Image (cartoon, grey):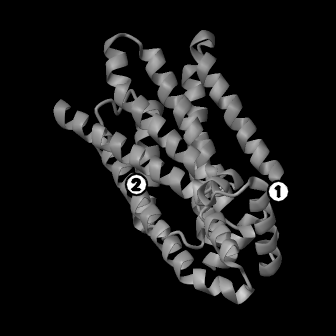
Amino acid sequence: MVILEIILFIVAYTALIVSLAFGIVCYKRNIEPKETITLTISLLLLIVSISISPLLKSLKYDDLSNILIVSNMTIVGCTTFLNTLKERKHKLKKVYKKIHVGIGLLIFSAVIISPLLNISPIAERFAIGYLLFSITVSMVMIRVTKPQIKMVQKINPDRLFAIAFLIIVPLYLILQFGFSNYHLNFPIGFLLPVIFTLLAINKIIEDINRLHILKNRVQNLQNDFFNYGFTDREVEVARLLVQGCSYQSISEQLFISVPTVKTHTGNVYRKCNVKSKYELMVLITA
């Protein structure tokens, strides 16, 4: 059973790392926000802390084990909420975002120093509550709001899968920390690497599809650029812009100076009646 558990965690690590790599590619292509990257990283840190927990406890580092898991729970709660805010259309004021982050920082700090103040159980319960609140609010927002224009091309995940993940992970953490005296051997732990693996695979497939859609649309619309009166060079610049390339990168790829790139970019924006790379991206992928 131990060998199986190790294998499952290794598979989960690999899937999350690959998912993170694809996420970075999508971010550079301007079709994924940095908040999604931080969420993926936080999930990776959480599963790493959970997987090394038995080893730390065998070495009598129980406090360190709990600190790692609970602090990463807090990070996951914060990044989940921030990612949802970024991807959905909503009317929440920025102050709520700042409050949520501030509370997360306070709980994170409390968890770190909890062994010194003998408040570990209290800090753990606050962290669990923070995670549950973040996930619950995120689920409600996903249910009642629409995605941002930039996220329209995201493939909608299976709702049952998402709900299963959002229920099993908090349930495991609650049983391990909230009611550990009664559920020390609860078998749900084996489901965690499987759930994380499925989540990562779902994200990888989603990112591959989005990159494929973007590539096809850019290729198909490249000829349509001439409808805007683009020159051949402006078509090349526009194509690289919607792929998320920087001025410096475009300069190096097309062997022209950065000021020349900026001049062509200005012409592209003017002819398309847009003011930024993001608006050009929306025009191309809409």
The image quadrant of residue 110 is top right
Toward the front, the furthest residue is: 255
SS state under label 1: loop
Position of the C terminus, as image quadrant, is bottom right
Q: Distance between the residues labelled 1 and 2?
A: 30 Å
Q: Is residue 162 above or below residue 170?
A: below
* 7 versus 21 height, above or below: above
Q: Name the residue under label 2.
A: 199
Q: Would you say 226 lies left or right of 121 here?
A: right
Residue closer to the observer: 222 or 139: 222
Q: Residue 93 carries which label?
A: 1
Q: Residue furthest bottom?
A: 227
Give the class, few, some or many, for how many residues have Cα within 10 Å of label 2's Cα (few <14, many ≥20): some
The percent coordinates of residue 11 (x first, y second) are 29, 43
Q: What residue type is labelled 2?
A: Leu
Examine the image and state in which quarter residue 7 appears: top left
- Going from N to C along the chain, the mark reached first, 1 or 2, is 1
Q: Give above or below for 120 relative to 227.
A: above
* Residue 157 in view (yes/no): yes
